[in-house]
Amino acid sequence: MRKGTCTSCGTEAGLGSMYSTAGAIKCATCAEITAKSGTNPTIRRVSDPTICANCSTDWGNNELQTVAGLPCCDQCRDKFYNYPFPKWLRASLAFSLVLLAFALAHGWNYFRLGSQLFRGERLISAKQYDQASVSLKTVVDQAPNCEKCILLLAKAYFLGGNPDAGYKTLMKHNNGYFEERTELSDNVKSIADRVAGALALTETIDKQLRSEQPEEALQSLKQARQKYPEWKALNGGEIPISIAIAFKKRQWDQFLSLAEESFREDPTSSEAAAQVASALAAKYAVTGDHSFRQRSEEMLAKAKTLAVTSEELTAFTEYSERIQHRLTTREIIDKDEYDRRYRASQKIAKAK
Amino acid sequence: MIIIPGFVISLLTFPGVIIHEAAHLLFCRITRLAVFKVCFFQVANPAGYVIHEQTDNFQKTFLVSMGPFFVNTLLCVLFCSAAFLPIWELKIEDLVAYFFFWLGISIGMHAIPSTEDLKHIWRLAPENVRRGNLLAIMSYPIVGILYLLNFGRIIWADLAYGIGVGILGPLAIFRAFA
């Protein structure tokens, strides 16, 4: 312990029990008198460099190292510099790590779904709609309340040219009602409106074809394709309607050329092969050239071999009768006329 | 504006307070600063504190003051990552996910250093900037924003920070890796 002498009264005491004010060292009594003098002085406790400020151990004449400006023994220094983490905190940390591992394991399925969702979004941006719909379908199956996922899947279906699946996806969720209005929902709505417009036009096309207005049907088809160019099924609609127009206008070369084009596009179709046979029969009917008849019969035989399903066989039987009639009589009549002449009586007979 | 007493918020988000103080202690030990007293949690103001040795070393001050900001933010992102997808993206009702989301947000809410922590950096920054200390230069905007967030606690800026980090952090991770 170090000793100090009060500069006011000369009392000698332990340095650690004295005070300093304005550079002078004072005992406790004189320091109190100074404090009450009204001069408002700054008074500080003097620290004895040989006494630990924390544990008050007197280290004789050995000066101690300081911590934060105060003398501190080695034990106390060690305690301050290695302040322990409490056991409960370490246990909590260990528990938190286990919890975090559990959280990540628990969320693994969600990560998988999430990555499928983001992948789907990316694929839509890259215009790879078929692959996007595969990814997003997995997500929607497991997260049926995720409006964003449903909207993205519907968008992928619509833009991939699959309007039925798109509508089914939308309608499965609250009958097509979505709570949140977002940029995506607005976007999907505008696509769905476009698709609805095209679908309405296909009904119009159907009616126009039934009422023998193929030119109008072709116009409607073009409008539908303009509205919904992603719908690939519409692309195949132009040739059959053009064939109907050519037949109506009795443009047999045009009829043959279109029928051949249709068969080239789908060489496995019995109907397309029969259509070529029909066009060749028409050419035979108007020219009398036997090479057309021979080719027509060859195509008819091919159409027969291509008809596999019961529906295809029924359609082939019906069509081949009319083509055979054309080849035999060299008279070109449409289906309605053929039915009126030769099938109405059969129906009556069957009914009897 | 909903006014909820501070101690209620502290009680509801106690894991964040504990981690904040534990991070202070951790960085004091890493930077070899003496720690005199630690209160990890109390139902009072402040909810927790660490009394430690002061230093004029800018790096040490920066680390000790900002340590909880980095630790709490990181843990907030990690815990919220487990909850982000089912709650925010997939809309799947999962109680475990809600628990992790609460935990993550609680931790994130207490990431912002107190004004007392920031004052230490603010005190040393000018001198260190004059000496060309890059960290001190970079600390100016960070400390400025954090000061603002501190004042914004009255309008739930701390909660907004927690939720923001808890959503944007995992979202950024999934966008990057998905």
Image (cartoon, coloured by chain):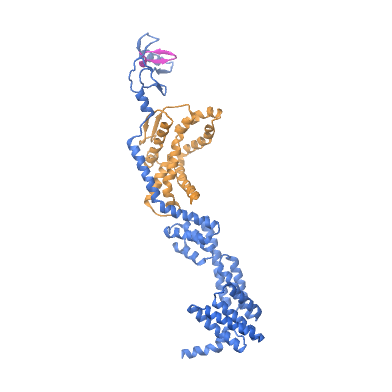
Q: Position of residue A295 (x, y in %)?
A: 61, 82
Residue A139 appears in the picture as rendered: yes
Q: Give yes or no for residue A18 being in the magenta stretch.
A: yes
Tally of numbered discs: 0
Q: Position of residue A182 (x, y in %)?
A: 51, 55
Residue A351 location in percent, x, y?
Answer: 46, 89
In the rendered structure, the colour chosen for chain A is blue
Looking at the image, residue A266 sits to the left or right of residue B110; the answer is right
Stretch in magenta: A14-27
Q: Which chain is orange?
A: B
What residue occupies the far top of the structure in this picture?
A10
User: From the viewer's perspective, is residue A163 above or below residue A241?
Assistant: above
The stretch drawn in magenta includes residue B164: no
Q: Decide if residue A318 is on the left or right side of residue A87.
A: right
Identify the residue at image location x=40%, y=21%: A65
Along the viewing direction, whichever of A179 and B94 lies nearer the viewer: B94
Whether residue B6 is visible, yes or no, is no
Name the image quarter holding residue B75: top left
Where residue A31 sits in the image (x, y, percent)?
38, 14
- Compared across the picture, whether A229 is left or right of A107 comes to right
Q: Is residue A292 shown above or below B83?
A: below
Closest to the observer, A250 or A192: A250
A18 versus B118 height, above or below = above
Q: Residue at x 47, y 63 (%)?
A: A169
Quadrant location, the N terminus of chain B: top left
